[in-house]
Amino acid sequence: MRILSLGAGAIGGYYGLRLAEAGADVTLLVRPGRAAQLERDGLVVASRGEVRRRRLPVVQAGQVGGPFDVVLLTCKAYDLGPAMEAIAPAMGPGSLVLPLLNGIAHLDALDERFGTARVLGGVAYIATMMEADGTIRHAGPADTLVVGDRSGAVTPEVRALAEAYVAGGVAARASEGILQDLWEKWCMLAPGAALTCLMHGTVGEVMATEDGPAIARGRLAEARAIAAAHGHAPRPPAVALADRTLTDPQSRWAASMMRDIQQGAPRVEAEHIIGDLIRRGRERGLDSPLLAAAFGHLQVYNAQGGRAA
């Protein structure tokens, strides 16, 4: 299986290395700075007490030789336009795109560019971050990847991809309902990002405030109402996971968007993760004031280039 991973950051680098360890032919498509880092040090992942280092082929935009069987897309949502142009040369008649972005707005853009039948759905439950020296650090035990054809069929290509991840040590599975899976993660991530970004703290720190638990439950309820209005009400296990994740008084969890803010990132994925959910709610006549308050805060942050507090 020939795979191109656009991005070798926290997500793309981690899953790219896992696939390579399973024997897949993986090439990394990265920016010049990351390319120099990878050429010098290789791809380095620290996970579960072990440090793995592997040298993989590296290309930059304009150097892609296609076609590839699968293109793994792990860019930030606001970089999706340039990312699609960068991967276009890798797309042959039978090539598939596996985006590991949150929310669902990216599917519309990818469908328009490459065709619905060639765009898979993917959901990753994992906490990773890339350090200044390029090391990707896998924090926590979670490492779950769900892959699916949006038709609901478990195609041979999807099955082979899931099996390749499993062979690389990932808890991966092929899904017959990947859109439902995407909505369920969205219904946890959007409230979680809204909660931790606006409050500037971890879930545990927010739960220690007088109204923190009520605010968390209110944001979860808003997201679930929107999902239900679109025919994707979260199932009981997903509800239980989200409740547990976002109301645990001992939790040190915070959304990756919150970590981006702490590091002074000039821009965060507020539009894709929170704004799009709010708009889809309004399409069904639903208002989401708690989510909207956080979205407004994040819009100011983005407008100020990361200088908003």
Image (tube, rainbow, N blue to C red):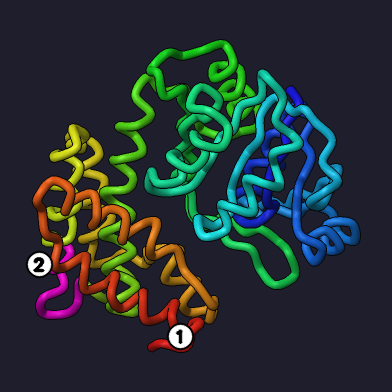
**Earlier sequence position, callout 1 versus callout 2:** 2
Q: Residue at x 9, y 67 (%)?
A: 214
Q: Quadrant where the N terminus lies? A: top right
In the rendering, which numbered label is found on residue 214? 2
Q: Residue at x 34, y 24 (%)?
A: 177
- Determine the residue positioned at 39% across, 63% down: 255
Three-letter amino acid code at disc 1? Gln
Q: Identify the magenta region.
A: 207-216
Q: Main secondary structure of the magenta part?
A: helix
Quarter of the view holding residue 3: top right
**In the displayed structure, does residue 126 sit left or right of residue 81?**
left
Side of 244 where 124 appears, left or right: right
Residue 133 belongs to magenta span: no
Q: How far apart, in angstroms, are the residues tagged by discs 1 and 2?
A: 30 Å
- The answer to which of 204 and 235 lies nearer the viewer is 235
Instruction: State the image coordinates of residue 277 (x, y, percent, origin top left).
Output: 27, 53
Residue 78 x, y percent position in the rendering: 52, 60
**Measuring 86% from the left and 46% from the top, which residue is drawn there?**
63
Dot 2, how many residues are within 10 Å of its Cα: few (below 14), some (14-19), or many (20+)?
A: few
Circle 1 residues within 10 Å: few <14, some 14–19, many ≥20: few
Image quadrant in which you'd find residue 233:
top left
Residue 248 horizontal/vertical position (percent): 23, 61
Query: Quick check: marks 1 and 2 in contact, CB under 8 Å?
Result: no
Above or below, comparing residue 93 to residue 146 in the picture: above
Q: Which residue is mark 1?
A: 304
* Rendered image: mark on residue 276: none
**Residue 228 position (above or below residue 8):** above
Disc 2 residue type (three-letter)? Ala
Local SS, label 1:
loop
Q: Quadrant of the C terminus?
A: bottom left
